[in-house]
Image (spheres, grey):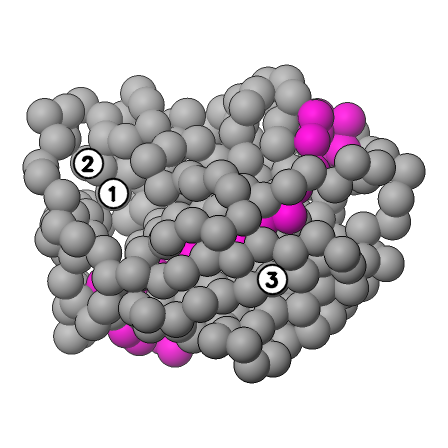
Amino acid sequence: MRAVSENVDSIARAFVEARRAAHGIRAYPGSPPMDLDQAYAIQDAAISLDGRIVQGWKLGRINPPYDALLGANRLTGPIFNDTVRSGTDVELSVIADGFGAAEAEFLLQLGQDAEPAKAEWTESEARALVSAVHIGIEIASSPYPGINEDGPAVTASDFGNNFGLLVGPAVDDWQSRDLGMIAVSTLINGKAAGEATTASMLDGPFGSLRFLLELMHRRGIALRAGQWISTGAVTGVHRVRPGDRVEASFDDQIITCRITAASPIGVRENEDVGSASGNG
């Protein structure tokens, strides 16, 4: 058990330090997780070590055959408060010599805390927690270039591959509108990269939230009012590099961002006492 714990801690520290330094790592920094329990143990350790406030959570689809092997069709990772931006044309960064991608997504903002003792949720119960729906772009980036190629457990272990979130305009009539009827498209440097609707996203954005609520109950993590839930890529995961321009359209609403290279950041004073804010 001690060897497992040491592996978890060393992997978590390696990823946090590489993200702070904004540099890539050639190989996975330890024995890769074999299942999602191991992956989330690494993620939890990294959240605690990182020390920033968690402002939300991203979700990503786990495709066959991994969904059957791992017993889940989605994975999640934290979105930290200092990586959330708002507007329609802003700069978002990726680790230049790691992995970088952009994803057009619907974002749900929670209007109330989730009941921590509640283990099972219906989609309508999950939807009742939502106070607003926005369009957005999630930036996926990791120091490890093979984070997606090595499977969902590896992806989950490094913050679910999240590196930032652009919160775009609100969907004003989301309570009565079928989000699955909104045509979503993504362009990279003016060229079409993907087009789809949430009809292809398992059970859609609110199904993503239902999944997250049940997973976080099992992980002992509270979901709180004000947090953003990035519900999953609609048009796909599109690789980007510094200098690229990303445009996502949701029917007649359009948001854009420019991709830059991440810069190193200083070591935070609360490095070893971040667990309280990390479960935000």
* Residue sitting at x 9%, y 37%: 267
Q: Which residues are magenta?
A: 126-154
Disc 3 crowd rating (10 Å Cα; few below 14, some 14-19, many 20+) is many
Residue wearing tag 3: 248
Question: Please, what is the three-letter code of the amino acid marked with disc 2?
Answer: Leu
Residue wearing tag 1: 46
Question: Please, what is the three-letter code of the amino acid marked with disc 1?
Answer: Ala
Disc 1 crowd rating (10 Å Cα; few below 14, some 14-19, many 20+) is many
Position of 252 compared to 139: left or right?
Answer: right
Q: Position of residue 185 (x, y in %)?
A: 67, 68
Q: Earlier in the sequence, mark 2 or mark 3?
A: 2
Q: Position of residue 202 (x, y in %)?
A: 73, 61
Q: Is residue 186 visible?
A: yes
User: Is residue 148 shown above or below 127?
Assistant: below
User: Is residue 143 shown above or below 75?
Assistant: below
Numbered disc 2: secondary structure? helix
Verify whether residue 225 appears in magenta. no
Res 49 label = 2
Q: Are marks 2 and 1 in contact (CB under 8 Å)?
A: yes
Question: Please, what is the three-letter code of the amino acid marked with disc 3?
Answer: Ala
Q: Position of residue 250 (x, y in %)?
A: 71, 57
Q: CA distance from mark 3 to mark 1?
A: 31 Å
* Residue sitting at x 70%, y 49%: 205
